[in-house]
Amino acid sequence: MFVWVMATGAQNMDVEQSGQLSTNSSPVLVEVPKAEGYGNSSLLTKEVGLVLSGGGALGFAHIGAIKALEEYGIEPAYVAGSSMGAIIGVMYAAGYSADDIMQIIKEERLYKVGRLMTTQSAFRNEGFSTHKTLLLELAELVPHNSFDSLERKFMVCVTNVETGEAAYQHEGGNLKEYVAASASIPGAFEPIVIDSVRYVDGGVTDNLPVSQLLTLNPQLFIIGVDVLPFVENFEAKNSIDMLLWMSRLFQSKNMDPNRAKCDWLIQSFALNEYHGFEFKRYKEIYQYGYDAMKAHIEAQQK
C-alpha cells in the first residue's frame, strides 16, 4: 500500500549550514506510525529503505526529504538511487546530513550547470560533456571509493549501453564511477566505462529501483521519493517542452510498478514550477521535498 502526498508550493527556508560530517548517522530500527488502511498493525518496527528517483535538478528535493526524516528521527539503513538520486543517495549513505549536502552544493557551486559540465566536441565523442567535476567531488567526499565502506547499505542503478538493460551495484569498488554512470544522461554526458562495459543513466531503465533494493532485504519498509510524478493536463509552451514531456511521460509510466511497492510514496511536485536543468533553483526545489515528506509523516501521526 502507498499514499501520495503533494507539496503544493515552495516557501523560502533558511538551511542551517553546518559544513560538518554527521557523526550520528548509524542506521537504527524505527517505529513508524501507520495510517488507517495500511494493514492490521497500528505500529510498524522495521529497518527502513530509502529509494531516490532520478530527475536532474528536481532531485534536490531529495535533500529536503532527508532533512524531514532527520527531524523525525527516521534513519534509513538502506539507500538506493538512480541518476540524481544516486548522487544525493551516496552522500547520505556516506554519512553526510541534509545540511552537510546543502553546504557542499553551495560551497562547490554545484548549482551551476557550467560547473557540472566539462564540455567537449559531440562529433568526436559520445556526449557533450564528461563527468570530470562529479568524479573529482566524489573522490574528495568518499575517498575510499568503496560500497563496502559506506555507513549505510547503498545500491545504485546504471544502464548497460550494449544490452540496454538495467544493472545494479551494491558492493565492491568503483563507487564513484558507478554513481557518475548512473547520472550520465545519454547524449549530454559520455558513458562511463567500468571493467570494459559502458554504462549510462540508470533512470533510463529503472528510475525508482525499489524491487532491486528489496532483494537485499525483503522485509524493508520502503520510503520512495519520486521527483518525476505524472502530471495530468500538461500544456507545452514550445517544442522543447513537448519533447521533455514525452520523455518524462514514458519514464513516469515505467515507474508505476515500483511506486506500488513503496510503503510510503512521497512525490515532489517541483516539476510544476521548475525543470530538470534549473540547478540554480536548488533551494526552492529542496523545499518541495521537505514539505512533501513532512506533510506525509505528520499525516501518519494523526
Image: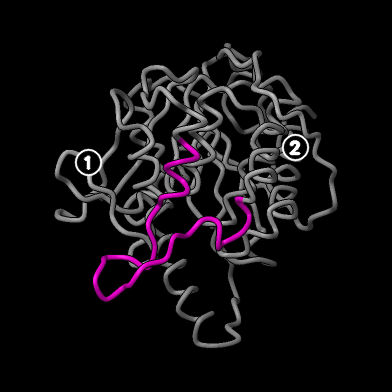
User: With respect to residue 245, does 137 lie above or below?
Assistant: above
Residue 13 percent location from the top left of the image = 84, 46
Under mark 2, the amino acid is Lys
Q: Residue furthest bottom?
A: 238
Extent of the magenta region? 110-138
Relative depth, front residue between 203 and 258: 203
Q: Secondary structure at mark 1?
A: strand
Residue located beneath label 1 in the image: 194
Residue 120 percent location from the top left of the image = 36, 67
Left-right relation of 109 to 190: right
Left-right relation of 174 to 271: left
Residue located beneath label 2 in the image: 294
- Residue 32 falls inside the magenta stretch: no
Relative depth, front residue between 56 and 273: 56
Residue pictured at 56% horizontal, 43% vertical: 225
Classify mark 1: residues with Cα within 10 Å, few (<14), some (14-19) or many (20+).
few
Cα distance in 3D space between marks 1 and 2:
39 Å
Residue pictured at 76% horizontal, 40% vertical: 295
Classify mark 2: residues with Cα within 10 Å, few (<14), some (14-19) or many (20+).
many
